Image (cartoon, grey):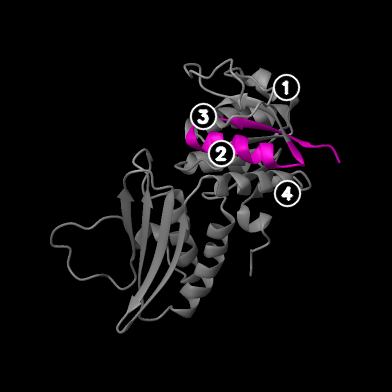
Amino acid sequence: MEKLRIVLNGVGGRMGRALVEAVNNEADAVLSGAIEHSQSPILGLDAGLSIGVNTNVIVTDKLENALSNADVVIDFSRPDASLKLLDYCVASNINMIIGTTGFDENGKQRLLDASQKIGIVFAPNFSVGVNLMFALLDIAARTLSKGYDIEIIEAHHRHKVDAPSGTALRMGEVIAKALERDLKTCAIYGREGQTGARLPESIGFATVRGGDIVGDHTALFATDGERFEITHKASNRLTFANGAVRAALWLRNQANGLYDMQDVLALRGM
C-alpha cells in the first residue's frame, strides 16, 4: 500500500511542530503539504526546520498548492480556519482529522453535513490515554450514580484561548450521558461569593491556566467518606500528534462519515 499523503495545517505552532515529528516518524505516511497563515515567518521554509529534519515540503499559505497532492488534512487550529479548510476539502474530496476545539452548534452542524461527502475524525483530544479515560468515565459514572458529587478539573498552558477545554467538556458530556442528565442544564462553570449549597445533580468545572502545562484532566467523584478520581496528565504534545496520525491511517479504510477516537480505538460500547 502506498504511503498516506498527509497535509498539516498550522505547522508553525506548538501542536504543528509535534505533528511534523509524528508524521516524520510514521513509516506508512508522508508529509505532502504544510499550511500557515499569510503573516507566518516560516512561509517559504522547509516544514521540518523547527525540529531539525528536512521534509522537502515548503510551508505555504496557498491551500490549492498545499492540497494538490493530499489524501488527508490534519487540522488543529481555530474554528474559523478549520471551517474554511473544511469547505476546500469537501470540494476536493480530501479527508480531515480535526482536533480544533471551540466550535459552536452551527460549526458542528457543518462538520456533520460535510461528513456525508468525506471522512472526518473529529475529537477534542487525540491522546490514546485520554480516550481510554472517556470509556472509563462512562463506567465510573454509572457505577457511582447515587450520592456522589462530580467535579471536573483541568489545567493548560497560559496561551490556551478557550475554557473549559474541549477535553473537559467531553468528559462532562460522557458523564452526563451515563447519568441521563443534560449537561447544558446541570453544568456549573464557576463559583464565586454566596453560592449556596452544592446542587446534587450538578457537574462542576474548574479551570487552571498557567505556564507551559500541556494538559491535565481529572474527574472527581466525592461522597461522604470516599473520593474517587480518574486523572490523565500529558507531558508532551507528541502524544496528541501520534494519535492524530493513527486516526488518519485508520480513516483511509473507512466510508465517509463523522467519527471520533472512540471509533478509531474501538472503545465505543466497551
Of badges 2 and 4, the one in the foreground is 2
Of badges 2 and 1, the one in the foreground is 2
Of badges 3 and 4, the one in the foreground is 4
Residue beneath label 3, please?
Answer: 81
Amino acid type at mark 4: Trp
Q: Is residue 16 magenta?
A: yes
Mark 3 and mark 2: span between their CA atoms?
A: 19 Å
Label whose residue precedes the other's in the sequence (3 or 4): 3
Amino acid type at mark 2: Ala
Q: From which residue to which does the magenta span run? A: 1-29
Mark 2 and mark 1: span between their CA atoms?
A: 23 Å
Tell me, yes or no, whether the two marked residues, 3 and 2, touch with CB atoms within 8 Å: no
Label whose residue precedes the other's in the sequence (1 or 3): 1
Residue beneath label 4, please?
Answer: 250
Residue beneath label 1, please?
Answer: 68
How many marks the image carries: the answer is 4
Category of crowding for the residue at label 3, using alpha-carbon neighbours closer than 10 angstroms: few (below 14), some (14–19), many (at least 20): some
Category of crowding for the residue at label 2, using alpha-carbon neighbours closer than 10 angstroms: few (below 14), some (14–19), many (at least 20): many
Amino acid type at mark 1: Ser
Above or below residue 141? Residue 16 is above
Tell me, yes or no, whether the two marked residues, 1 and 4, touch with CB atoms within 8 Å: no
Residue 150 point in image, percent of width and height? 36, 69
Q: Quadrant of the N terminus?
A: top right
Category of crowding for the residue at label 4, using alpha-carbon neighbours closer than 10 angstroms: few (below 14), some (14–19), many (at least 20): some
Category of crowding for the residue at label 1, using alpha-carbon neighbours closer than 10 angstroms: few (below 14), some (14–19), many (at least 20): few
Mark 2 and mark 4: span between their CA atoms?
A: 19 Å
Q: Which residue is depicted at the point 33% across and 67% down?
A: 202
The local secondary structure at tag 1 comes to: helix
